[in-house]
Image (cartoon, grey):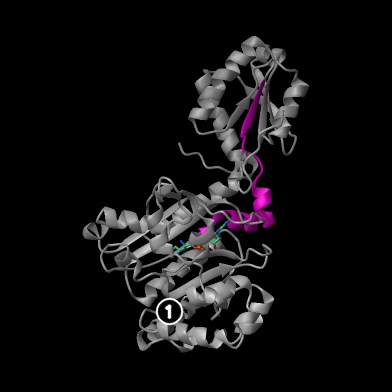
Amino acid sequence: MTTLQAINGFKDILPDQIHLWQRLEATATDICRRFGMREIRTPILEKTELFVRSIGEATDVVEKEMYTFADKGLTMRPEATASIMRAFIEHGMHVQQPVQRLYTMGPMFRHERPQKGRLRQFHQFDAEIIGPTEPQQDAELIAMGHLLFSELGVKVSLELNSMGCPKCRPAFRQRLIAGLEGVQDQLCEDCRRRLHTNPLRVLDCKKPGCRALVADAPSIQDALCENCTSHFATLRDTLDLLGIPYNLNRFMVRGLDYYTRTTFEFVTDQLGAQSAVGGGGRYDGLIAELGGPAVSGIGFAIGMERLILLMEQNEKENSAALSDTDIYLAALGPEELKHCTLLAQFLRQQGLRVALDYSGRSLKAQMKIAGRMQAHYTLIVGEQEWAGKEAILRDMQTQQQGGFSLSGSPLEQSERLAVVLRAGSGKSDPA
Ligand code: HAM
């Protein structure tokens, strides 16, 4: 019989990795709190139409990557922005509070070819600010992403572009098409198709042939209208003020159609072909397009698996993975085990991480278990120690050991023990 395995591109997150996920989630949550953002959670399944109308019919995501139940007209979300905007409109959130600062974390689904850093089920940390139109707000949001990377000790660089607005983009689009029509035979198959449906995407095709062909294409940054030019200039000034470095990249065109003006990506050269760790931008027309009020928005999403790959490469993270056990209680007889069972309960009530084994294994076997768990301490309660009312407390790192008195009630013993453990692991006593 063949054993069952997870689907290609769908991955388990195993306990050995979980500390990285928890650290990422906790840091992101805390940074969101500092920036006044509130969490929102939306369903995984939405009407297909939501994604078609927001992400755009002629995008790779909608054309070929969505997991759709065609007979039901439903799709598993490929990203979070569309769902958050749907929820914003549906619940009239702008009525309660004209500026909404929202974030979410969770799984997204895209049917792409799996490779390092590219999955079919992946997770995003997504942040959206709905309402403000000012470029300083764009800079603030970018600064929030920047702070997350820096607090996680991960180096990325920031690519910045502006996609213009409905006033200036159409003329640029026409110029681009006209310029590329002359060389369309030399474009790759995808770009030849995109030339008339989504010509800006040709600018960020990764194929060397197409890259060479667009090298001399006009720059959108030179084709912006007055308002877009001034928005982009103030954004850059504010990033300079905040000391956030960026590269102007006129070829960086995001893969989703809803963007206007500011677009950005956080990139790395550490992940092979998957260079984008996060990306986002402004989407001033999206909410109205979906039937909501005419309000602006800006946001980004970070690919959590990609960020975790970078955190893993960080040596500091690997050493932080160590112990998740403060003390292992080694009991060597039925009475001793009863006592340790109660002691464990009291220690856990005081917030300590305790392990013990009920199978009556030898001291040697139990010490092996404690070693494998990388427990900070082991308390040994054998027949002799039980009779003499003094257990052995061993510091597993220094291998030093001493007596621990078993006098007083088990609760009182656990309190004395907790003080020693906290002092030993450098944790402060909350009591
Ligand atoms: P996106 O660029 O499509 O933007 O995705 C954001 C990030 O999700 C990427 O930079 C990447 O790290 C990660 N990602 C995307 N696809 C995969 C995949 N197949 N496997 C692993 N990671 C992946 C958005 O989704 C927009 N909603 C961002 C946004 C929010 N714009 C405005 N607000």
Residue 23 to residue 228: above or below: above
> How many labels sit on residues?
1
Amino acid type of disc 1? Leu
- Please identify the quadrant where the C terminus is shown: top left
Residue 154 location, x and y as percent? 61, 62
Which of 19 and 70 lies nearest the eye of the viewer?
Answer: 70
Asked if residue 379 lies left or right of residue 166, the reply is right
What residue lies at 42% left-to-right and 47% top-to-bottom?
45
> Is residue 289 shown in magenta?
no
> CB at mark 1 closer than 8 A to ligand 1?
no
> Is residue 304 shown in magenta?
yes
- Please identify the quadrant where the N terminus is shown: top right
Residue 282 location, x and y as percent? 40, 71
What residue lies at 49% left-to-right and 66% top-to-bottom?
59
Which of 327 and 183 lies nearest the eye of the viewer?
Answer: 183
What residue lies at 49% left-to-right and 73% top-to-bottom?
198
Rendered image quadrant of residue 84: bottom left
Residue bounds of the magenta highlight: 302-330
Question: Is residue 408 visible in the rendered structure shown here?
Answer: yes
Rendered image quadrant of residue 324: top right
Residue 178 location, x and y as percent? 51, 87
Residue extending farthest to the right is: 364
Residue 229 to residue 65: above or below: below
What residue lies at 44% left-to-right and 50% top-to-bottom?
75
Which residue is tagged 1?
235
Residue 10 location, x and y as percent? 60, 46
